[in-house]
Image (cartoon, helix red, strand yellow):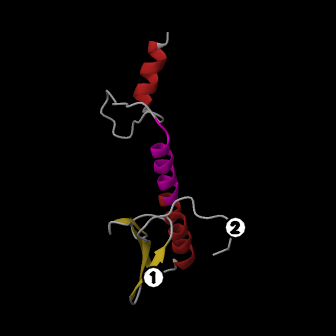
Amino acid sequence: MVASDHEPAETTDRAITVVLLDSGRERRDCRSYEDAIDLVKEALEPGRVAKIENREGDIVFTSSEMSIDAWEVEWRQQKRRLSVDTEEHVCPHDNVGCVFDDRCVQCKMDAVQDSR
């Protein structure tokens, strides 16, 4: 990792843990999710599985199920959504992916029709 003058934006009392699995099991504590993501990117190689474990001990990422790049994008989006006050939105079309700041096609079409 490259040293920087900046502290991580998010730190926890308990460590975020990266678990590396190949012929053995290696556990490395990280100060933040950003550090854990960087560690996974550095350590991941063919035949090795990496997992990120949150403070509560839940596995939140497994490299055998998803790429670290795709997970990082999703994690950053969720983090951004949590940091912004948004109004509650319940999709009338029961689309679970339809949220306040990213509506489904049907809700977008409804909004256009309602604005006429």
- In three-dimensional space, the C-alpha distance between marks 2 and 1, rounded to whole angstroms, equals 34 Å
Question: Which portion, as a residue range, is magenta?
Answer: 72-85
Could you tell me the amino acid type at mark 2?
A: Asp
**Closer to the camera, 31 or 58?**
31
Residue at image mark 2: 5
x and y, in percent, of residue 85 in the image? 47, 36
Q: Secondary structure at mark 1?
A: loop
Q: Quadrant of residue 34?
A: bottom right
- Residue 28 sits above or below residue 111 on the image: below
x and y, in percent, of residue 106 in the image? 40, 27
Q: Quadrant of residue 91?
A: top left
Residue at image mark 1: 47
Query: Where, quadrant-wise, is the N terminus in this rendering?
Result: bottom right
Could you tell me the amino acid type at mark 1?
A: Gly
x and y, in percent, of residue 82 in the image? 45, 45
At x 33%, y 30%, the residue is 90
At x 43%, y 63%, the residue is 66
At x 49%, y 18%, the residue is 112
Of badges 2 and 1, nearer the viewer stands: 2
